[in-house]
Structure formats: structure tokens, C-alpha cells
Amino acid sequence: MRKFITSGLKSLLLAAAGTALFSFPAWAFSIRGEITQVDAGGVSGWAWNKEDTNDVQTVEVHILEEGNPEPIKYLKTAADNFSQSLEDEINDGWHCFSVDVDWSALEGQDFKVRAYAVKDGKYYTLGDTISYSKSSGSSAKAASSAASSAKASSAKASSSGSAAASSTAAASSQTAKASSSGLTSLGVFTTSGYCGCPDCSKGNNLTYAGTVPQEGRTISADLNLLPLGTKVMIDGVVYTVEDTGSNVEGNWIDIYYSSHDSAWAHGLKQQEVFLVQ
């Protein structure tokens, strides 16, 4: 945060935010793909940059145990295998990926599987989250039953006091809300918390944009990626980029809290961020 900012500079920055809503590289919106299969052997799918068919995507697969918002397994591979079915679909079959998974080595029976294209340290979601049951060997798109999953997770959290289940319900609810609203996923960001205390922001009481920060609204971001005034949704809450900082770079967002304890309690999280248009 910077307390002393001239009104002219503030006006210039806010005007720039209005004309340049979003400055992700153009190829970020041309990346397409999805998980096509999850079975007893592993996970497969495809990832493709329609603007540059020679651009081989690095894919990271995240496996989460049902009821736990944090991945328990990370698998990285390249989308450079051939599939005739993909060739028939997009006329370019050399963009498939496949990773082996030893499900027996993972605790639990029910899992969520997500895939991301990773480029320059940024994560771009590939299709829907997939549910997989180790006991039955069956899989299904988690997004198709997001509302019922959220309801079930909320009931479980209420009966058992499980914070993890509550987090899963919130994530499912956000996915459903974003899907129904047609929001664009910007990928997975690292999020942290900060407040107006001397430790977090040198005690300044104004944001970089010159506003008074407010919990539930203000976030700090890399202005090269998310200009001032950009609105994003994180965990179902719509925030506005009003601040920046020397340590906030790339896929990192700092969320403002009214107290230091709340900011500290946020910790570090990996959360999907959606652009609100």
C-alpha cells in the first residue's frame, strides 16, 4: 500500500484500468482441453493451444481426497501423445496426455481430479473437475452435480464439524456459480492475507488506488496481470483489485482483512480465480 499517491496518478491508473481490463497474454485464452478419462489405471485427457499448434502444453494433474480441499497428489506430464479421436475432433491429434495413478497407495475411496495447463508459472484450468471412486472404479464430471455435492458437503460439515468438508462445499458452490454465470477461469493462484497494520503494510490506511481498504472487497495483485479496478471472484466472493505490493507478483493475490489475526489465519492457499466481466 502507498499512502502518498497524487490525484493525477490515481486518475491515470484508474483510467488505464477502465481501458485495459485484463492483461493476460493472448495465448492464455486460446488454451483448450479437458480430462477425458479417469479409471483404475490413471488419468488421461488433452491440452491444446489453438493459436499455436506447435506449442506443447505442460499439464499438471491434481488429485484431492473427497472432503479435503488440498491436493494429496500432483502429477506432471506433457500433452504430446497422439489420439485419433482428438484428431477427428479438432484436426490435430498430437495433444493428448496420460499419467499413471496408483490409487491403492492413496488413502480414502472417493477423489476429485483436476487438470491444469501450466505455462510461465501460471495455471489454466482444463475442463471440469472429475469425481472418481476407487471402490467402484467409476468416474463422473463433478460439475454436473455441483449443487448436490455442495449440499451434501454442507450437511456433512454441519453434522461432524468438519472444516474440510465445508471448504469443499464452498469450492463446489463457486464452480457452480461461475459456470452458471459464464465467468472465465484465470487459473489457480496462491492467495494470502494482509491487513493495515505496520507488519503487513507499514500502517498505511489507503490502497495504491487511493481508496480505504475494505474486507470482502479489497485485494492486492500484480498490476501487470490484473489492473486496478479488475473484479474477480474467489471462493464465491467478488473482490476488486485496489492494491499492489513488492511481493505480489504473478499468480499471487493478497486478500485484505480488517484484523491481523484474520489475515494471518488465511495462510497460503491455492484457489481458482474467476474474472468477473
Image (cartoon, rainbow, N blue to C red):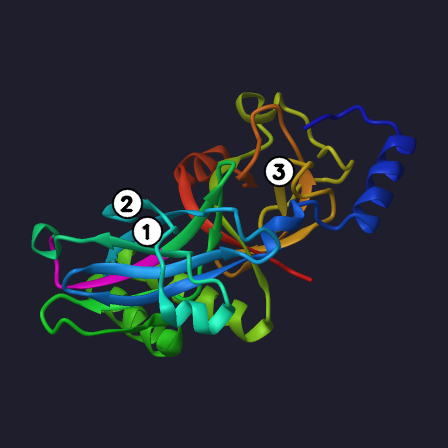
Q: Please tell me which residue lies in front, 21 or 218.
A: 21
> Which residue is at 53% across, 67% downward?
178
Distance Cα–Cα, label 2 vs label 3: 28 Å
- Name the residue type under label 1: Val
- Quadrant location of the N terminus in the rendered image: top right
Q: Which residue is mark 3?
A: 220
- Name the residue type under label 3: Ser
**Residue 10 seen by the camera:** yes
Q: Check disc 2 and report its element: helix, strand or loop.
A: strand
Q: Are marks 2 and 1 in contact (CB under 8 Å)?
A: yes
Magenta segment, prevailing SS (helix, strand or loop):
strand
Please say whether residue 108 is one of the residues in the magenta stretch.
yes
- Name the residue type under label 2: Tyr
Please say whether residue 163 is one of the residues in the magenta stretch.
no
> Which residue is at 71% across, 49% downward?
22
Within 10 Å of the Cα at label 1, are there few (<14), some (14-19), or many (20+) other Cα atoms?
A: many
N-terminal label among 1 and 3: 1
Q: Classify 71 as above or below 135.
A: above
The magenta segment is 107-114
Q: Farthest residue toward the right? A: 8
Q: Which residue is mark 1?
A: 61
Q: Check disc 3 and report its element: helix, strand or loop.
A: strand
Residue 226 location (% of width, % of height): 67, 43
> Which residue is at 41% across, 63% downward?
34
Residue 257, by quadrant, is top right
Disc sitting over residue 212 in the figure: none
Q: Classify 176 as above or below 226.
A: below
Q: Which residue is mark 2?
A: 74
Within 10 Å of the Cα at label 2, are there few (<14), some (14-19), or many (20+) other Cα atoms?
A: few
